[in-house]
Structures are given as structure tokens and as C-alpha cells.
């Protein structure tokens, strides 16, 4: 039985890790929850974002946090273009097509990355990489504390966009009633692409906040995508607060699971939660009943 | 139409006439020239250049290709009229069954020898498949002892096997500890959950207590593990003298980074085949986190000019000089040396030549090359330590480039 001296730091660390998961899940919940696109390319696009941050740092000396000004807008443009140019066109409005198209995209992106970037694991060396913040006697790595704050801010921003702007209203209208939205003059293709772009821009934010404490290689997305899907289901599809809450819960469950059942079984808890939620509360913590 | 001009201004009829004449001359006029253009010797290189171990696979391929380029630049295989060596490349994708399927394809296409397959599991499959056609097969890295214990007449390994490496690791740790007045009395093992990590952990937790080092905890983790804080917190609360990681590169990087963030102070960090501690990439990217970490791993002889020249040549090509590069290089060299001595690509003759190999490998920290059941009995690992941003050999003494610094911070 681990003592409190370990449990407190472990929970705090779980919260910061969970915030990172939540960041990845935020984009997914927008795309998956609102547009009903199961985006299998989410992990691959996160990996692209991480490479962008990496190369900006290595080639131009741009700090990952400064890259927040460059990478998320870039990822937004990429997402917009992907939805308009490839996913939207190839899907012909059928969900099963979208599924296969995003899966295909993931394979193409990953193999292109393998070809272009090689499979080295790369890390950035930032001056604050080893700095820690002491909270309740626990040493929390500074990059993770920043990521925690970043996840909260991003979730708040997304919530603002969705509830206070015309774009948000259009996205919500489209999610609820596509034909009706069309009738009132909403440009469906444009709004779809904007939503997809927003979702991918979230990955750009995640990439900037993640890289100072993590690494990048062409396979790096795999480790996050399944967790992100779990968080989306747990939090309730399309709910940003739910995704944030879900991410934090998953982070803490993983941390404590690792502590009590051994590290290789730590992830068991995550998927137990996944199954329990599907069985007992399929709408998720904050999801709405259909 | 018949006057259609081909590239270079030759008309079609002229071209045909010249071609026929050249052919006639070739067959009848210059038979000796034809014979001098010996058919190339084809060597299959099967490595996991995609998939989860693609980095290592690519490094192996690069090393093997460098060896082939060097051999050809030096005049090819002399006993076969200067025959050039030609690489036939294949990707196992990190999967044994795909590696084996590539062997089948190569054997059907008439391959003269195979160098494969980085991982033990893949090497086991490729060598077994090659044995069906008696195709000479040299294992470059795969350390599993089983590879050379199946009585396959076609399977050879110039590098050391796992049993030897593990023995060596325990013996040398004991020597290093005793030389410093036995400051290390406890150890914690952090290992990944596949055969490599579990095997190493099992062996060390059995053998270390015999040398007076108590193993106070063994922590297993999954691949990938995204966060090592829990594990490091446990290390912190148990305060072992020695930390022994046995994991792959990605996890090693995160573990080392977290240990530094959580300000872990141990007397030593000692790995067995622990990728990062003998990896220039890690040392260059994290000089502070890497400092004084020790490893028992494959390495070259730092006192050999040949080894240092090869390292420089590899680095000039933009390669990181990891053990995959020089072990694959050596494997190709060993195979070609056997073909050279056999004077032909006859499979039995090449296998016999491999079994009798006494190749000079003084560029490696090995004893004399002597094949026993396909394993080079002279092969051994060395102990390395990161010192001042460089990787130094600290043991055995005859190859050492620096003194051991142990305990750390002491």
C-alpha cells in the first residue's frame, strides 16, 4: 500500500497528464461529437502538429509556447483544407465512407512521415524542460503545469466560440438539424470545414503544450487516440466541459491504477471505465440524451 | 518509320546492326572480358525499416549498406574475379512472419546469403526459413540465445548473445561496486513488459543478491508508457542505491527525464542493453540527464583506428553511430569473408566457411573469432559510461577509454 507521500503527488501528476489527454480529446469531441465524424486521423494529425513544433524549434529556434501563435492557425488551415478537399468530397455524405477516408488519411500521413522524418524519436531541449513547481510537497514539471492551464483556457475558448459566436451557433444548428440549417442559409460545407479546422487547431495547441515534456516519432499518435476516444465517450459526446472533466478523471485513474495495480495494469482502469460508462451511462457524464 | 532516330542520333537500323555486331563480338571475340564481369553476389538484407522498431531497422540497413559499399570499393570478392556484392532489400515491418516470407521470396529468386533481422523474434523466423534452403544466414543483432541453439547449419552470429551479456553485466557491476568499496547494497529494476525487459529483470533479480546487492523492488511497465512520474515517485520513496532500467528508447528518455525532474539521487544508474545509455542521440540531446549513466551493451573497440574511421565515415553520412550500425556492418563483412574464402556462392561451401571463420575483428572489443555452433565465442559486450557528454568504455580494462566514475556524486 503506497503511503500518502506518493499518493498526493501521483494524483496531482495524474491531473496534469489528464489535462494533456483532455487537450487531445477537445478537438475530437468537436469533430466526433458535433459533426459525427469518427476521425481516425486524429492521432496522425497530432503527430504532424508535434513535428511542426519540433522543426520550428530546431530550425528556427522558436520556443514551443511561441509556436502557439503559428501551429494552431496552421493546423486550422490544414483541417479546413482536408475536410473541404478530401474528407467531404470522398464521403458523399455517408458516415461509413468518412470512417474509411479518415483511416486512409491516417495511414498516408503516418507513412509519409516515416519517409520524410524517419522513425527517430525526437525531443526538444528547452531551458525550462527540467524545471519543477512545488505544490503540496510534490514536484510537478513546469511544462505539465503550463499544459494544465492551457487545457483549461482552450476548453473555455472553445465553449465561448460555440455558445457566443455565429460560427458556434451555425455548428450547433448543423449538428442538430442539417436540412433546417441549410434552409436558413447556413453554408453547410463551409461550416463543416470550419468545425473540422477548429478540431485540428486544438491538436495544434495540444502539440505545442505537449512537446516540452514529451517526444515525437511517426507512431506517437497511437498512444493518445484511444485514450481520447475514451474521454469523449466518458465526458459525453460534443461536451467540452465533459472532455476536460473526462480527461482529468482518466489521468487520475491511470495514475492511481498504476500505483495500486502495477504500471502495466494501470491502463486497465481506463478501459474498465469506458465499458462501465457504455453500459450504465451511454450518454457520458455531461452528454445529452438523444 | 524505319528511319526513326533514336537518342544520341543513331538510326534504328544502325543501332540493330551495331547491337548484333557487339553481341557477336561479345560471345566469340572477348570471352575473357565476359568472364571478368563476374555475376554479382546477391545478399539479402531483411530489416524492420517500418513499424514500431523502424529506427533500429533503418540503422541496421544503413550499416549493412555501408559495408557493401566498402567491400565493392575495395574491389569486390577477389576469389570470384572481383564480383561485386549486390544488396537485395526487404522490410520485415517488425513482424517475424513477414521477415520469413521475405526469405522465401529471396530464396526463390536465388539469393546467395542473408543478413537479418535486428530483433530476436524476427531473426529466429528468418534463419529458420533460410535453413529450409540451406541459405547462409548471419544474424546481425538479435541476442536471444535460442537463435544459435537450434542446430541450424546455416545460422551464424558474430555479436554476443544474451546469456553472455547478462553474465558479463552482473560480473562487471560486482567488480565496479567492490572496487569502490561496495557502496551499492540495494537496487530497483524498472523494466518494460516484453521478453527483453522481463527476461533481464528476472535474471538480475536472481543474480544480484548472490553478489550482495538486494533487489528491493521490480517495476514492470507497458509500451508505450506516457508518464513515468508514478514509477519515479516509488523510486524516490524506496531510495535504492542502484537504479536498473531495462526498456526501449522512448520510455528510457521519459524515465531519465522524470528522474531528473523529481531529483532522484542514486549511487548509480546501470542498464543492460539499455538503448539510451549507449546512444549518442540521447547523450547529445540530454547531456545532463545522461551524465554518468552506465550500460552493458554492444560497442566498438575505441582503441581501434579502423573502428574510429568507420564511426567517422558513418557520421559523415549523417548517421548516429549506434550499435545497430556496426553490428550489421560486421555481419555483412563476416558473410562476405566466408564467400571470399569459399571462392563460390555454393551454399554448403559458404556455410562451412562461416563455421570455420577466424575473421580478424580487432575493431570490436572481442576475443579471437571462433564459431561454436554458429555463435562467435569471442564476442562480448562492454561496459560504457556517459562522461562529459561522451560515451566512454570503462570495462574491460584492455578496451577502456576512461576510468569508472562510481558512485555518482561521490
Image (cartoon, rainbow, N blue to C red):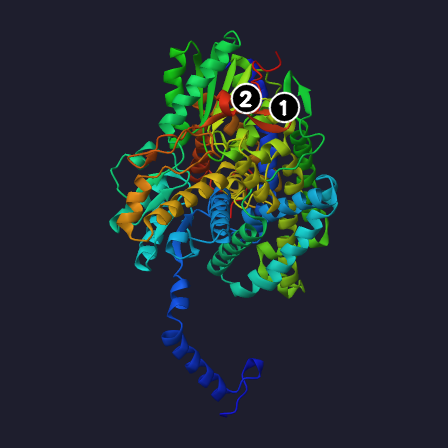
Q: Chain of mark 2?
A: B
The answer, for residue A34, to whether it is visible in the render is yes
**The C terminus of chain B appears in which quarter of the rendering?**
top right
For the point 50% across and 8% down, the residue is: B182
Check residue B375 in the rendering and tell me which mark sits there, or answer none.
none
Reply above or below: A78 against B120.
Answer: below
Q: Nearer the viewer, residue A221 or A24?
A: A221
Mark 1–mark 2 distance (CA, rounded to whole Å): 10 Å
Secondary structure of the residue carrying numbered label 2: helix
Q: Chain of mark 1?
A: B
The answer, for residue B116, to whether it is visible in the render is no
Residue B36 location (% of width, % of height): 41, 63
Instruction: Kindly indicate the quadrant of the structure image that contains residue B200.
Output: top left
For the point 58% across and 44% down, the residue is: B313
**Residue at which label 1 appears:** B261
Residue A287 location (% of width, % of height): 55, 42
Q: Nearer the viewer, residue B105 or B361?
A: B361
Is there a contact, CB below 8 Å, between mark 1 and mark 2? Answer: yes
**Looking at the image, which residue sits at the far top?**
B181
Question: How dense is the environment of label 2, judged by Cα within 10 Å: few (below 14), some, or many (20 and up)?
Answer: many
Secondary structure of the residue carrying numbered label 1: helix
Residue B291 location (% of width, % of height): 61, 24
Residue B279 location (% of width, % of height): 55, 33
**Residue at which label 2 appears:** B232
Q: Earlier in the sequence, mark 1 or mark 2?
A: 2
Task: Say left or right for A216 vs A153.
Answer: left
Instruction: Kindly indicate the quadrant of the structure image that contains residue A65.
Output: top right
Q: Nearer the viewer, residue A40 or B101?
A: B101
Amino acid at each position: 500500500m503506497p503511503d500518502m507521500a506518493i499518493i498526493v503527488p501521483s494524483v496531482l501528476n495524474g491531473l496534469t497528464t489528464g489535462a494533456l489527454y483532455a487537450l487531445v480529446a477537445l478537438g475530437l469531441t468537436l469533430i466526433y461529437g458535433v459533426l459525427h465524424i469518427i476521425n481516425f486521423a486524429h492521432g496522425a494529425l497530432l503527430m504532424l502538429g508535434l513535428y511542426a513544433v519540433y522543426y520550428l524549434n530546431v530550425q528556427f529556434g522558436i520556443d514551443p509556447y511561441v509556436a502557439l501563435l503559428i501551429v494552431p492557425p496552421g493546423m486550422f488551415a490544414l483541417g479546413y483544407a482536408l475536410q473541404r478537399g478530401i474528407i467531404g468530397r470522398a464521403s458523399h455524405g455517408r458516415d461509413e465512407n468518412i470512417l474509411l477516408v479518415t483511416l486512409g488519411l491516417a495511414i498516408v500521413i503516418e507513412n509519409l512521415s516515416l519517409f520524410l522524418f524517419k522513425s527517430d524519436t525526437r525531443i526538444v531541449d528547452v531551458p525550462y524542460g527540467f524545471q519543477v513547481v512545488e505544490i503540496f510537497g510534490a514536484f510537478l514539471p513546469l511544462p505539465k503545469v503550463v499544459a494544465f492551464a492551457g487545457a483549461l483556457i482552450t476548453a473555455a475558448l472553445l465553449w465561448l466560440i460555440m455558445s457566443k459566436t455565429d460560427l458556434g451557433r451555425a455548428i450547433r444548428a448543423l449538428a442538430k438539424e442539417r436540412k433546417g440549417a441549410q434552409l436558413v442559409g447556413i453554408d453547410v460545407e463551409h461550416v463543416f470545414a470550419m468545425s473540422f479546422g477548429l478540431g485540428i487547431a486544438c491538436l495544434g495547441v495540444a502539440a505545442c503544450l505537449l512537446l516540452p515534456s514529451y517526444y515525437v516519432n511517426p507512431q506517437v499518435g497511437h498512444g493518445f487516440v484511444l485514450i481520447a476516444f475514451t474521454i469523449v465517450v466518458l465526458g459525453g459526446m460534443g461536451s467540452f466541459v465533459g472532455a476536460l472533466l473526462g480527461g482529468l478523471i482518466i489521468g487520475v485513474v491511470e495514475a492511481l491504477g498504476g500505483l495500486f495495480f502495477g504500471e502495466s495494469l494501470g491502463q486497465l482502469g481506463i478501459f474498465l471505465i469506458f465499458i462501465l460508462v457504455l453500459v450504465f451511462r451511454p450518454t457520458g457524464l455531461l452528454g445529452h440524451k438523444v | 518509320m524505319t528511319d526513326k532516330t533514336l537518342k544520341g542520333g543513331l538510326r534504328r537500323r544502325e543501332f540493330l546492326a551495331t547491337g548484333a555486331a557487339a553481341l557477336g563480338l561479345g560471345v566469340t571475340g572477348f570471352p575473357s572480358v565476359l568472364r571478368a564481369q563476374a555475376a554479382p553476389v546477391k545478399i539479402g538484407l531483411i530489416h524492420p525499416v517500418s513499424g514500431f522498431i523502424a529506427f533500429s531497422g533503418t540503422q541496421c540497413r544503413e550499416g549493412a549498406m555501408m559495408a557493401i559499399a566498402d567491400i565493392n570499393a575495395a574491389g569486390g570478392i577477389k576469389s570470384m574475379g572481383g564480383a561485386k556484392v549486390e544488396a537485395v532489400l526487404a522490410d520485415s515491418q517488425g513482424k517475424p512472419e513477414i521477415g520469413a516470407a521475405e526469405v522465401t521470396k529471396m530464396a526463390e529468386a536465388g539469393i546467395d546469403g542473408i543478413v537479418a533481422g535486428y530483433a530476436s523474434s524476427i531473426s529466429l523466423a528468418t534463419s529458420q526459413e533460410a535453413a529450409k534452403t540451406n541459405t547462409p544466414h548471419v544474424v546481425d543483432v538479435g541476442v536471444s540465445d535460442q537463435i544459435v541453439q537450434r542446430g541450424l547449419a546455416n545460422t551464424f552470429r558474430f555479436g554476443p548473445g544474451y546469456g553472455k551479456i547478462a553474465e558479463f553485466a552482473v560480473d562487471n557491476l560486482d567488480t565496479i561496486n567492490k572496487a569502490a568499496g561496495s557502496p551499492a547494497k540495494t537496487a530497483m529494476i524498472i523494466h518494460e513488459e516484453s521478453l527483453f525487459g522481463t527476461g533481464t529483470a528476472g535474471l538480475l533479480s536472481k543474480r544480484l543478491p548472490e553478489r550482495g546487492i538486494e533487489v528491493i523492488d521490480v517495476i514492470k511497465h507497458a509500451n508505450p508508457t506516457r508518464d513515468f512520474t508514478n514509477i519515479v515517485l516509488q523510486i524516490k520513496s524506496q531510495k535504492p542505491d542502484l537504479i536498473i532500467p531495462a526498456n526501449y528508447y522512448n520510455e528510457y528518455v521519459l524515465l531519465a527525464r522524470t528522474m531528473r525532474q523529481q531529483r532522484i539521487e542514486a549511487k548509480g544508474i546501470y542498464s543492460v542493453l539499455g538503448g539510451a545509455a549507449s546512444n549518442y542521440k540521447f547523450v547529445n540531446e540530454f547531456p545532463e540527464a545522461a551524465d554518468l549513466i552506465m550500460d552493458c551493451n554492444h560497442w566498438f573497440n575505441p582503441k581501434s583506428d579502423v573502428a574510429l574511421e568507420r564511426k567517422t565515415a558513418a557520421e559523415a553520412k549523417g548517421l548516429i553511430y549506434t550499435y545497430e550500425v556496426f553490428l550489421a556492418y560486421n555481419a555483412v563483412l563476416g558473410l562476405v569473408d566466408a564467400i571470399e574464402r569459399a571462392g563460390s556462392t555454393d551454399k554448403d561451401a559458404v556455410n562451412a566457411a562461416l563455421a570455420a571463420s577466424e575473421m580478424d575483428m580487432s575493431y570490436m572489443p572481442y576475443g579471437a573469432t571462433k564459431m561454436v555452433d554458429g555463435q562467435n565465442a569471442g564476442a562480448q559486450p562492454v561496459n560504457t559510461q556517459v562522461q562529459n557528454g561522451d560515451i566512454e568504455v570503462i570495462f574491460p580494462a584492455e578496451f577502456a577509454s576512461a576510468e569508472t566514475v562510481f558512485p555518482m556524486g561521490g
